[in-house]
Image (spheres, grey):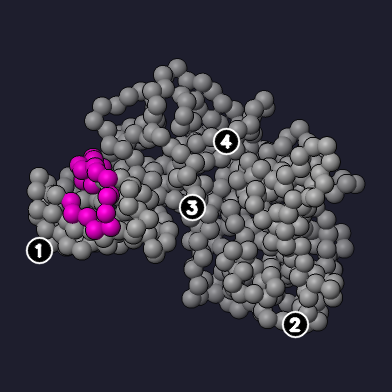
Amino acid sequence: MTKIFTNFFISKNFIALAISFFSVAAMGQVRIAQVTESMFDNSNLLVVSNGVQNLGVISYEYVVTENTSERLFVLYQLKSDGEVDFANGYNCQAAESIAFDVNKGRATRTILTEPFNGAIFVKADGTVGYSNIESVSEAIFTPYLLTDKRADNTNKYALVKIGKQIWMRENLAATTFADGSHIATNLNKADWEATKSPAYTVYDNDLSNMQTMGGLYNWYAVTNQPHLAPQGWQIPKLDDWNMLAEYISPKSFMSVPNEDFSLSFSAGELLKSINNWITPPNPGSGSLLPGNNMSMLNCQAFGSTSTSKFFNGYSGKGHQAYFWTSTLSEDDDKKAIFIRFFWDSQTINYNQEDKFMGYSVRCVAQTPIKIDKNQTTSVENITNNQQITILSANEGSIHILIPRSMVGNNITVYNMLGSQIIKRTADNETLSINTSSLSKGIYIIHIGTTTCKVII
């Protein structure tokens, strides 16, 4: 009897049985080559798999050393417990190790003696090297997202590594606390400014803005128990933003507190997104772009609530980005510290404001990122419109249906050892794969970043 698994998630018990049945080695070796920027559209972290087990994580990040700063693709290994060793990585485009300082995150790059031949390899024993390995399978990549399930809502957030920190790449869009409990919303302007209880709103009171802009939360929601941040994450303190600014722009960094209320006069350009900022009409003699987003934190000008009667309760879209910290100000009865970016400045600035103000929230990882080694991935498929549909699977052929957007991509079939068995171009939405040369067993079909398993 032929069984089809269109869901990419197979239980640990099933994987264990399959591995035992087919006498699969504990870890297959893979080759990683031709890593490109477009692979990180959904998240700056990719899980590396051999089709049977997860082997590591590739991060697309801004690497800053004492003398250089540039974007690199960095491979990180998994420790024995599945924790990602983000302190020590390997350049995917040169024979080079990269170590990050445990205190401030500054990177040190060391050229290795191995020659670089266009690829990096994860060996059978889990170690990383650049020397060529014959008959090795190609690595499988899956975007790693923060999946935040609360009550009846699930949000998925792109992530980015910056120095020693892991940040959400987009604004929090939670409508409940992490335990599913209620957060007040739909308050009128007077009630919003009077309440001392947790509350959130959405820019222009337009619910469609939640998924693109995230929510605007008062400070009472930010520091509430239960937590607003997902489990294992936290609302950053001023010190966390301080560490971020010092890492990406060490020469212009200004430690807090200081009389200018600035962390850096230039780091804003590296943190602000390229889009959704209004460009100043007359930047003067130079070219003052809203941001180059070199850090890939992608801070966008999504505004805030406003005390002005002329803005109907909201202001600043296109002109400012304000983020709450979890740090109290000196006037801790009424005010707390927030971070701000402006449309016409490259400064990253901090200041204090009334706790009733509605600002955006980003979260930073509080606990180490862990990957389950014994699964082929730890994340779900990104979007529902990117599914592979198995129409039928027989001993001689497999018939599948793919979205039109996948046509033109490579379609690859792997066995449970992670070895590539079939590779061809997906030239139509309905595809037939000739499996007459394959024995009965479990196989993995991979197109783009979408994968499924099938038994024939």
Decide: marks 4, 2 in contact (CB < 8 A)?
no
Q: Earlier in the sequence, mark 3 or mark 1?
A: 1
Secondary structure of residue under mark 1: loop
Pick out the residue farthest to the front. Answer: 281
Name the amino acid type tagged 2: Asn
Residue 190 sits in quarter: bottom right
Q: Position of residue 453 (x, y in %)?
A: 25, 56
Q: Based on the picture, tell me whether residue 420 belongs to the magenta stretch.
A: yes
Q: Which residue is mark 2?
A: 188
Residue 118 sits in quarter: top left
Query: Do we see residue 242 in this rendering?
Result: no
Q: Based on the picture, tell me whether residue 387 belongs to the magenta stretch.
A: no
Q: Position of residue 370 (x, y in %)?
A: 46, 50
Q: Which residue is mark 1?
A: 1
Secondary structure of residue under mark 3: loop
Q: Earlier in the sequence, mark 4 or mark 1?
A: 1
Q: Earlier in the sequence, mark 3 or mark 4?
A: 3
Name the amino acid type tagged 4: Arg
> Cα distance, mark 3 to mark 4?
17 Å
Name the amino acid type tagged 1: Met
> Cα distance, mark 3 to mark 1?
37 Å
> Cα distance, mark 4 to mark 1?
50 Å
- Tell whether 282 sits left or right of 246: right
Q: Which residue is mark 4?
A: 71
Q: Position of residue 316 (x, y in %)?
A: 76, 62
- Tell whether 416 sits left or right of 30: left
> Cα distance, mark 2 to mark 3?
36 Å
Q: Which residue is mark 3?
A: 42
